[in-house]
Image (cartoon, rainbow, N blue to C red):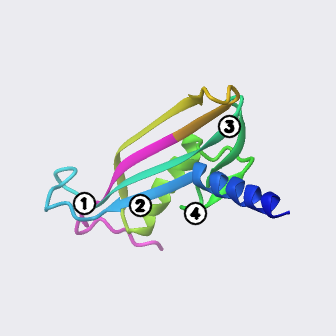
C-alpha cells in the first residue's frame, strides 16, 4: 500500500512538472521605445508546453488561461491560445497596440519512451500606447 502511494505521488509530481505555462512581463525598458511615436508599456513573452502521446494526443499541458497551472487532454500549446495570452495581458496593462508579435512552435521526441513528445509554443510582442492626439476624440450624438 505504501509503495502504491509513493508511486502515485511520483507520477503526480512528474505530470505537474511536464505541463507548464508562463507569461513574463518586462516593464523596465531603460527609456527605450519600440516605435517612434508610441509610449512603451512592456515586452511580453508567453510559453505553453506539454506532453503528447504519438505527437498528436495531448496528455498534460500548461494552461493558456492561467499561468503555472496544468490541463489534461487539451491542446493548450496552440498558437492561437498563446497569442490570446499575450494580447489579453497587453490589454490588461492598458496598451493600445501590440507590435513585433512573433510566435514559434517546436517539439522534441522523448526517444527513451518511443511514444511521447514534448511540444511547446512561444509568443512574444511589444505592448505600447498610442499618443493621445488632440481633437482625435469624436463626439457621439
Of circles 4 and 1, the one toward us is: 4
| Label 1, residues with CA under 10 Å away: few <14, some 14-19, many ≥20 | many
First to last magenta residue range: 121-141
Q: Image quarter for residue 75?
A: top right
Residue nearest the observer in this picture, 25 or 100: 25
Dot 3 or dot 2: first in sequence order is 3
The image shows residue 40 at horizontal and vertical percentages of: 24, 60
In primary-sequence order, the first of circles 1 and 3 is: 1
Q: Which image quadrant for residue 79?
A: top right
Q: Residues within 10 Å of mark 3 (few under 14, many from 20)?
A: many
Q: Is residue 108 above or below residue 8?
A: above
Few, some or many C-alpha atoms within 10 Å of disc 2 (few <14, some 14-19, many ≥20)? many
Q: Which residue is mark 2?
A: 90
Q: Residue at x 54, y 40 (%)?
A: 120
What numbered label is drawn on residue 107?
none
- Asked if residue 10 is positioned above or below residue 111 in the image, the reply reads below
Which label belongs to residue 66? 4
Q: Earlier in the sequence, mark 4 or mark 3?
A: 3
Please name the residue that numbered disc 1 is placed on: 40
Earlier in the chain: of badge 4 and badge 2, it is 4
Q: Is residue 70 left or right of residue 82?
A: right
Q: Nearest to the eye among marks 3 and 2: give it.
A: 3
Could you say whether the residue bearing mark 2 is in a helix, strand or loop? helix
Q: Position of residue 83 (x, y in %)?
A: 50, 48
The numbered disc on residue 52 is 3
Residue 79 lies, with reference to residue 35, above or below; the image says above
Q: Quadrant of the N terminus?
A: bottom right
Amino acid at each position: 500500500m505504501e509503495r502504491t502511494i509513493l508511486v502515485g505521488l511520483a507520477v503526480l509530481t512528474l505530470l505537474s512538472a511536464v505541463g507548464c505555462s508562463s507569461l513574463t512581463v518586462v516593464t523596465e525598458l531603460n527609456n527605450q521605445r519600440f516605435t517612434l511615436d508610441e509610449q512603451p508599456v512592456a515586452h511580453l513573452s508567453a510559453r505553453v508546453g506539454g506532453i503528447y502521446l504519438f505527437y498528436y494526443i495531448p496528455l498534460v499541458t500548461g494552461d493558456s488561461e492561467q499561468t503555472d497551472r496544468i490541463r489534461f487532454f487539451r491542446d493548450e500549446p496552440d498558437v492561437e491560445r498563446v497569442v490570446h495570452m499575450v494580447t489579453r495581458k497587453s490589454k490588461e496593462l492598458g496598451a493600445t497596440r501590440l507590435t513585433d508579435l512573433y510566435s514559434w512552435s517546436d517539439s522534441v521526441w522523448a526517444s527513451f519512451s518511443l511514444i511521447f513528445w514534448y511540444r511547446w509554443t512561444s509568443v512574444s510582442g511589444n505592448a505600447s500606447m498610442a499618443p493621445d492626439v488632440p481633437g482625435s476624440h469624436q463626439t457621439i450624438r
